[in-house]
Image (cartoon, rainbow, N blue to C red):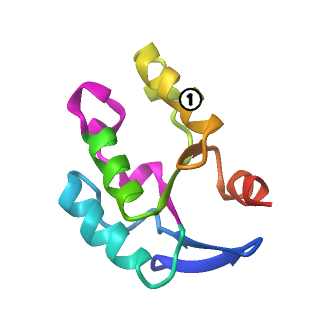
Amino acid sequence: MADLIEEHHGVPVLVCDSDGARISDVQDALDQLVGSAFQGAEVVAVPVERLDESFFDLRSGLAGDITQKLVNYRLRLVVVGDISGHLRAGSALEDLVRESNRGRHVWFVRDLDELFARLA
């Protein structure tokens, strides 16, 4: 399956395929996410499997850099999947997830059904 834009509750969502190319740096995010989202998406749903491990190590700065790029392009980022293993590694990520899920720009959800429910 390729990355596809689907509308859910009136919101166009770029649903990224878990088998797609890995996102290891900001340029990957620009090429793979922003480029595809410019076909009309407002939300970019990225499976955990597509994100490099360094995304979840906040000291690397990758999560902040990618998030900022997407926000600059007026796109919302949703990380989809089980991140429990990453959460056990430290409280900074747990704090980020909790705070992000309270806002509108970055969410961490278990699955697409949870995302679609939040969009309702």
On the image, the x and y values in percent for residue 22 come to 29, 58
Q: Which residue is outermost to the top? A: 91
Q: Is mark 1 on a helix, strand or loop?
A: helix
- Which of 23 and 105 lies nearest the eye of the viewer? 105
The amino acid marked with disc number 1 is Glu
Residue bearing mark 1: 99
Task: Locate residue 118 relative to residue 33 in the image: left or right.
Answer: right
Range of magenta residues: 43-61
Q: Residue at the spot x=24%, y=35% of the render?
A: 61
Q: In this view, does 102 lie above or below 65?
A: above
**Residue 49 colored in magenta in the image:** yes
Q: Which quarter of the rendered picture does the C terminus lie within? A: bottom right
On the image, the x and y values in percent for residue 104 come to 60, 48
Q: Residue at the spot x=53%, y=31% of the render?
A: 97
On the image, the x and y values in percent for residue 4 come to 52, 80
Task: Locate residue 112 relative to residue 67 in the image: left or right.
Answer: right
**Residue 111 colored in magenta in the image:** no
Q: Residue at the spot x=21%, y=31% of the render?
A: 60
Task: Locate residue 10 relative to residue 25 in the image: left or right.
Answer: right
